[in-house]
Image: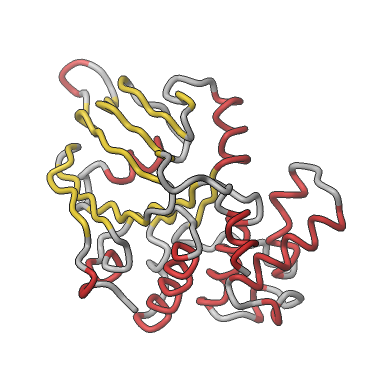
Amino acid sequence: MKRAADRASGGAAADNPVIRARELVKIYGEGESAVRALQGVSFDLRAGEMCAIMGASGSGKSTLMHILGCLDRPTSGEYLLDGRDVSQLERDDLAEIRNERLGFVFQSFNLLSRTTALENVELPLVYARGDRVDMKQRALECLDLVGLADRAHHQPNQLSGGQQQRVAIARALVNRPSLLLADEPTGNLDTQTSHEIMEVLAGLNRRGMTIILITHEHDIAKYADRMIELRDGRIVADRRVELAGRAT
């Protein structure tokens, strides 16, 4: 179990920064109508950290997530992912990095309805044209990590919302990313199921997975060991979470 999670985390050493962001600026539009979504965001994230990024609507947290996830590029500033400057890469290069280095978990589960949990988890490997036997083994390992090995052959409509999100997490892990980005992963779930999903993510973090969690809920953010708060495109707080405030 731990070895499989270590492989999923990319085996990064705990003292190496996975993310180094320096003075990230993102401007939408031009002239008087220009919107400065990010205004000089700088921080480092080291391997093995679990960091919650918080902020009200319009604070810039979604824009920052898109840049960190190589879904968008900053207007200016520097973004190093695993030591590589990806700030101004072209679309194809960004797509390659997303496929090889990043795992995504979204509020909506985005599962294919007529395929099994196992096939959904295998999907990124199919696109990468991996070996079929290895694909199945890796997918089963990831389902086991999230506690769903016994549901491998169930379709999404045979699974609860929490189970579907676990499948989505397993799919995000199958390419063994160095960074997992979870964007409001509990947004469509009830309170109890939300905490069950956060226990899964916290468990992965304890095994070495580096995680960025985008959330507006303080009780969800407490599962992280660090909180970064944004307001009007700037970091206004960057603090460690007290152990007493974390889920156990």
Q: Give residue 217's position: percent from left, percent from top.
A: 25, 66
Q: Nearer the viewer, residue 212 or 25?
A: 212
Q: Nearer the viewer, residue 120 or 100?
A: 100
Residue found 52% across the figure and 45% down from its top: 12
Residue found 81% across the figure and 46% down from its top: 130
**Quadrant showing the C terminus:** bottom left
Q: Nearer the viewer, residue 7 or 71?
A: 7
Residue 36 visible to an observer of this rendering:
no
Quarter occupied by residue 136: bottom right
Residue found 20% across the figure and 44% down from its top: 59
Q: Is residue 202 above or below residue 134?
A: below
Q: Is residue 79 above or below residue 137?
A: above
Residue found 56% across the figure and 81% down from its top: 160
Quarter occupied by residue 198: bottom left
Q: Is residue 212 above or below residue 38?
A: below
Left or right of 196 in this view: 31 = left
Q: Nearer the viewer, residue 109 or 210?
A: 210
Q: Seen from this angle, which residue lies furthest left?
A: 236
Left or right of 31 in this view: 28 = right
